[in-house]
Image (spheres, rainbow, N blue to C red):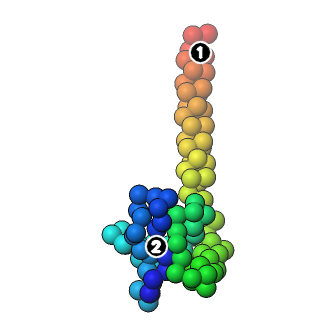
């Protein structure tokens, strides 16, 4: 079933998003999530089959967003958090080595 087609605002003009009965599929790329589809809509790239289809995909996207675990819905924030923790651990190690070296000099 046709969901939407990419319009002239993108290099993907003419590529279709379809529903195969179990998932949404983007031509030549494979499965696509409802939140991903709605992101293309927010960017103005999609021509919808009809407004009912747009509403259905939008409601599906909201259900997926609401039910996603927090760490999966914000992977960038998690990577930043892990990076900060690693940086603090390295800084502590360096400070300990400096302090150890200074105590040996005294």
- Residue 56 location (% of width, % of height): 60, 83
Residue position for label 1: 102
Few, some or many residues within 10 Å of mark 1 (<14, 14–19, 20+):
few
Q: Is residue 3 above or below residue 45?
A: below
- In the image, is 78 to the left or to the right of 19? right
The foreground one among 105 and 47 is 47
Name the residue: 52% across, 72% down.
47
Residue 55 in which image quadrant: bottom right
Q: Residue at x 41, y 62 (%)?
A: 12
Element at badge 1? helix
Choose the circle earlier in sequence order: 2 or 1: 2
Q: Residue at x 42, y 74 (%)?
A: 16
Q: Which residue is mark 2?
A: 5
As drawn, 85 above or below 71: above
The N terminus sits in image quarter: bottom left
For residue 28, side relative to residue 13 (left or right): left
């Amino acid at each position: 079933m046709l969901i939407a087609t990419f319009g002239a605002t993108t290099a993907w003009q003419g590529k279709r998003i379809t529903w195969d009965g179990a998932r949404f599929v983007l031509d030549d790329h494979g499965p696509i999530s409802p939140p991903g589809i709605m992101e293309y809509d927010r960017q103005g790239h999609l021509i919808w089959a009809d407004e009912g289809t747009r509403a259905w995909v939008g409601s599906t996207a909201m259900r997926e967003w609401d039910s996603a675990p927090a760490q999966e819905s914000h992977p960038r924030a998690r990577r930043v958090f892990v990076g900060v923790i690693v940086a603090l651990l390295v800084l502590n190690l360096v400070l300990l080595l400096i302090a150890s070296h200074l105590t040996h000099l005294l």
